[in-house]
Image: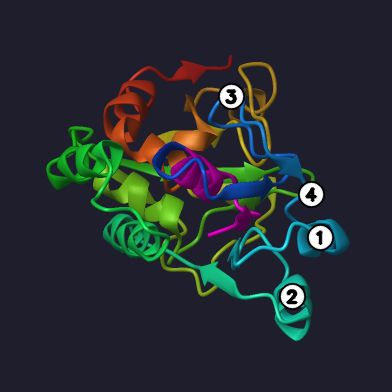
Amino acid sequence: MRVVSLVPSLTEAVALTLPGVLVGATDWCSHPAGLDVARVGGSKYPDLDRVRALRPDLVLLNVEENRRADAEALRAAGVPVRVTYPRTVPGALTELGELLAELGAPAEPAWLRAARRAWADPPRLAPPRRAVVPVWRRPWVVLGGDTFAGDVLRRLGVVNAYDQQPERYPRPSLADLREQRPELVVLPDEPYRFTADDGPEAFAGVPCALLSGRHLTWYGPSLAEAPALLTDQLSRPVTAV
């Protein structure tokens, strides 16, 4: 198999499990460290000529991270694609197991077995905390319902104030965010890089938890350590004056 991955979390999963099959990845595929494969541009705008030049047997994409137009262009060129779309933790674990088996893994890798154990009974905030979860600013974009990251947080005891919204990624005003009267604001460091100096000041007086975006949004080896790491970060919020 020759695989090109346009999804950073799947790049990490394939590289650690079947390193010999991965021949290409995006410029944003940062894990595992030292990954030595051809780079094909960004997730949103990959260089499809470079992808095709690698003669892949399969290209991995994701509904949220990649454009439908690129998937269709690859299919039209005769390149097989696999488009992933997990929206729950169990769904992600199942999809990862099926994908790796199709790529030739003789058994589930240790990291996937560890992830299943970690999520079988994850630690939870006690009591649960009502929260808003911005993933971008200028404009503000938050997690709505039916998202993978939202399911991760729900399993850790976070009650998303926008979980019942029809949009998966609503764009409320800052005034609307504040009107939700959250007990906690969850600020991941990707896709927007929220930091202690960029984000909490918009919610003065409200505890803000700075989270690892990789552990919140990636579905791959990071899932094994995500419950413990994210719960620890959720339990140590900062509060801007």
Q: Is residue 200 left or right of residue 153?
A: right
Say which quadrant the C terminus sits in.
top right
Q: Which mark is residue 74?
A: 2
Farthest residue, direction left: 121
User: According to the image, what is the colour scheme of the structure?
Assistant: rainbow
In this rendering, does residue 181 appear at all? no
Q: In this picture, is 47 found above or below 189?
A: below
The stretch of residues the image draws in magenta is: 1-15
Disc 1 residue type (three-letter): Ala
Q: CA distance from mark 3 to mark 4?
A: 42 Å
Q: Position of residue 58 (x, y in %)?
A: 59, 66
Where residue 103 sits in the image (x, y, percent)? 42, 60
- Residues 100 and 139: in front is 100
Q: Secondary structure at mark 4?
A: loop
Helix, strand or loop under label 1:
helix
Left or right? Give the position of 182 relative to 48.
left
- Give whichever of 207, 123 is nearer the camera: 123
Q: Nearer the viewer, mark 3 or mark 1?
A: 1
Mark pair 2, 4: CA separation: 14 Å
Q: Which mark is residue 53?
A: 1
Q: Earlier in the sequence, mark 3 or mark 2?
A: 2
Q: Label 2 neighbourhood size at 10 Å, few (<14), some (14-19), many (20+)?
A: some
Q: Which amino acid is tagged 4? A: Val
Identify the mark nearer the N-term, 2 or 4. Answer: 4
Label 3 sits on residue: 204
Which residue: 26% across, 59% down?
90
Q: Is residue 104 visible?
A: yes
Q: To which residue does mark 4 refer?
A: 40
Give the residue at the far bottom of this rendering: 76
